[in-house]
Image (spheres, rainbow, N blue to C red):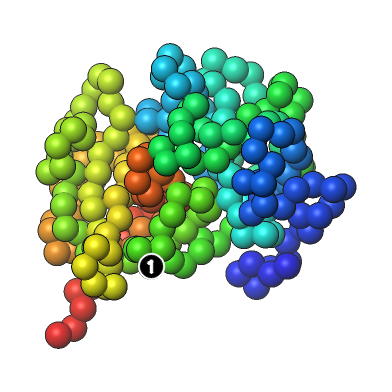
Amino acid sequence: FLVGGALLLSCATANRIPIDRLDSFFGKNVEVEGFVTVASGTFASSYCYDSNCTMSDCGFAMQDTSGGGIWVAFSCSSSYAKVQIDNRVIVKGTVNLQGGGTSNETILAIFPVKKSSVVIVKGGNFNVLPILQKVHEVSGTGQLIQVVGTVIHRMNEVNGEDPPGCTTDCYGYVIWLAGSSGSGSFVRVFFNAAPGTDFNQINTNFTIGDRLKVIGMSGRYITPEIDPRFKADVTLLPPLKK
């Protein structure tokens, strides 16, 4: 299977389940293998491990040759292996909804059953390229995606979002991008405020009308969104020629 011109492992190895089929295994124990697209703890500021949000989720996202993506959930107080982007990993766990949400609130996730359920395969790193999507195609499937759109709302211009420079109880910041597919074609871009993401002042970089290329995980909170991992995932593009 080719991604970006390079050969990836077969997701059928050792009867492992292709990630794009995991919705058919809800509530069951599975084993998957793939490459990390979001490092452990990147989204801890906004991802809850349980339905009451008493614990933050320091998990990670991974993707395999099927093109499917999945969140691997574990609390920040746990001792599961901490993984980095491009690590090749094998995960065993139960398929459920991230954060104990409902199907229209959060994304599908695997909950490892024990510490040894997350294994980093040595020497197996690979750079997963984002899947190109249009703004209206973002659906919260856990994949690493890339969209291009025009800023129609900046952070702190949508009620209920944390202001830039927030220091306590901070979840993240938001902009909205409009696509080119006509009315109703827009998507939320959510910048998590976890330590190391350095998104606190990113709102000063963009204004309404700017065209952006955004790479991130295809996430969901009530509605689909794209979750960038760090500043380099967001690029200011030249305006379209009239």
Q: Residue at x 33, y 33 (%)?
A: 193
Residue under numbered circle 1: 134
Q: Residue at x 28, y 26 (%)?
A: 170
On screen, residue 1 above or below 206: below
Q: Residue at x 48, y 21 (%)?
A: 50
On screen, residue 201 above or below 135: above
Q: Please give left or right for residue 101 compared with residue 65 in the image.
A: left
Q: Is residue 198 at least partly visible in the picture?
A: no
Q: Please give left or right for residue 239 compared with residue 113 in the image.
A: left
Rendering coords of residue 51 (x, y %): 45, 22
Q: Residue furthest right?
A: 14
Instruction: Indicate the quadrant containing the N terminus: top left, top right, bottom left or bottom right.
Output: bottom right
Residue 231 versus residue 12: which sits nearer the camera?
12
Query: What is the number of callouts on the image?
Result: 1
Q: Quadrant of residue 167?
A: top left
Instruction: Indicate the quadrant containing the C terminus: top left, top right, bottom left or bottom right.
Output: bottom left
Q: Secondary structure at mark 1?
A: loop
On screen, residue 97 above or below 129: above
Q: Please give left or right for residue 149 compared with residue 151 in the image.
A: right
Rendering coords of residue 120 (x, y %): 72, 38
Q: Residue at x 84, y 52 (%)?
A: 13
Rendering coords of residue 182 (x, y %): 24, 72
Q: Amino acid at mark 1?
A: Lys
Q: Is residue 147 at least partly visible in the picture?
A: yes
Residue 178 versus residue 90: which sits nearer the camera?
178
Q: Quadrant of residue 94?
A: top right
